Amino acid sequence: MSPVHSHLPTDAADLAALESNLVALRWCAVVGQLVMLLLAQFRWDMPHTFAPLWFGVEILAVLNFLLTWRRRFVPASANRLSFALTMDLLGCAWMVFWTGGTANPLITLFLLPIALTATVLSARRVIAFALLALVLYAVVIGHAKPLPPLPGSDAMATYWRGMWINFVLSLILLTVFALRLAGRLRQQREALAAWSERDQRQRTLLSLAVQAAGAAHEINTPLATMATLVDELKHTRQGDVELGADLTLLAQQIDHCRDAIQALGLSARGHVDPPLPLDVWLRQLISRWRIVRPEARIEFEFDPAMSSVMLVPDLSLAQTILNLLDNALDATREGGSDRLQLSARSRNGGLDFQVRDFGAGFNGNTDVGASHKPAGMGLGLLLSQTSTEAMGGSLSIRRAAEGGSIALLQIPGSALRPQALA
C-alpha cells in the first residue's frame, strides 16, 4: 500500500506518484524475468550460464523491497528517485549484457526510464540519465554475451516475436503513464483554477478589510453623537411611551455597534476570550443579533450534551453565523414569514451548524454585488465562505424539500482553538 500524498506540494506529489509507478513496474519486471528464467532453464533447457541472470533478478527484487519499505517512512525525493533509476539502468544493462546485447529486442527498454522521468525530474538529471544509458548501450554493443538459440527454433522468428513483445510492453507502459500524466495535469489545472478563485476572493476581502478599518475608525464619532441625542430625547420626551420604546431600541442598537467595533479592535490585537459552553455562546450571540433583528422568530435546537462542549469565541465564526441568520431572515420575510431555525450538533470532534429559512430558496449566486435584496451588497455569503475556508471548514446551501433553503456550516475541531472540543 503506497502512502498518502494528497497534502504534499505539487513537486513532491509528482515525485511520489512517479516513484509509486516505478515500484509497481519493477515488481512486474521481477515477476516477468523470473518466469522467463524458469522457462529457459527448466522447460526449454537452453545451453546458457544462468547464474548472472538469477543474480540480477535477486538484486532488483531486494532493491525494490528496500525502496518499498523506505517509502513508508520517508517522503519521496529526487535523490532517492535518481538512485533507483540509476540502479534500474544498470540492472537493465546487466540483463541485456548476458542475453545477447543489441540482438535482444528488449534492449529498447533503456529508453523507458528516461521517458517516464522527463516530466518530473530536472533537465540536468534527465540529461545525466540519457548519457548513462548511452554509455551502457556502448558497453553492451562491444562486450555482450551472445544468447544461444532455442533448440529446434528459427532464430529470426524468435527475434521478431521478441520485437513484438517489446513493442506491446512499451506501448502499454507509455500509454498508462501518458494517461496518468494527463490526469495529473487535469488535477493541477483544476487546483490552479480553485486557487485563482480563492486568491481573487482574498484580494476582494483585503480591500474590504482596509475600508472596514477606516469606516470603524470614522464611525465612532457619529455613534457618540447619536448616543448623546438619544439620551437627551429620553429626558426631554419622558412622557411619550411609544417614542421611549423606540429610543430604547435605538440605544441598544448603538451599543451593539459600539460593541462590534470594540470586538473588531480586540480581534485585530490578538485578544482571545476565555472558553464558553457552546450553548451559552450561541445564546449570547443570538441575543445580540435579536437587538439588530428584533422581528425574527428563531427556533434554536441543540443536543443537550452540547452544553459540555467548550468553545473559544471566535469573531470569524460568530460573523459567519450572523451572516447566515441575516440572509435566512431576509429570505424568510420575502416569503411572508419571520420564522427560521438554527441547530448545532457535534460531529467527529467538530461542529455542524444548520440554518433553515422558509423563503423562496437559494439561487446559487455568491458573487460580490449579486445580492437579490434591494439594499444588499452581496458580501455576506462571500465573507462567510471565505471565513469558513480559512477555518478549514465547509459551507453548503441547498433547497429544502418543503420550501426555503438550508445552510450547513461544518467547522473542524482544529479550528476551535485552543482544543476547544473535549
Image: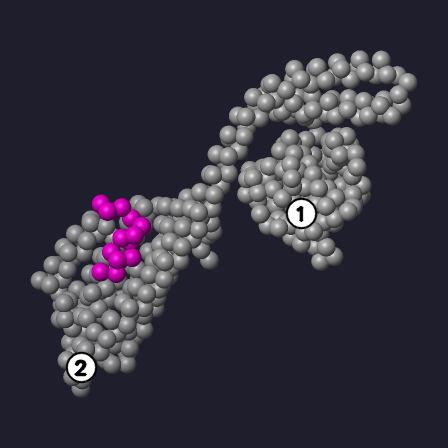
- The residue under label 1 is 407
Magenta region includes residue 367: no
**Above or below, comparing residue 413 to residue 112 in the picture:** above
Q: Quadrant of residue 182?
A: bottom left
Query: Residue 8's spot in the image, x, y percent?
Result: 44, 45
Query: Residue 31's spot in the image, x, y percent?
Result: 34, 68
The region drawn magenta spans 111-125
| 1 or 2: mark nearer the eye | 1
Q: Residue at x 35, y 64 (%)?
A: 176
Left or right, 299 with reference to 186: right
Q: Residue at x 14, y 67 (%)?
A: 102
What's the mark number on residue 295? none
Left or right, 303 with reference to 188: right
Query: Residue 277's spot in the image, x, y percent?
Result: 75, 34
SS of the residue under disc 2: helix
| Residue kind at label 1, given as amino acid type | Ala
- The residue under label 2 is 157
- Which of the two residues, 411 or 99, is positioned nearer the viewer here? 411
Chain-order first, disc 1 or disc 2:
2
- Quarter of the image for the C terminus: give it: top right
Left or right, 360 with reference to 143: right
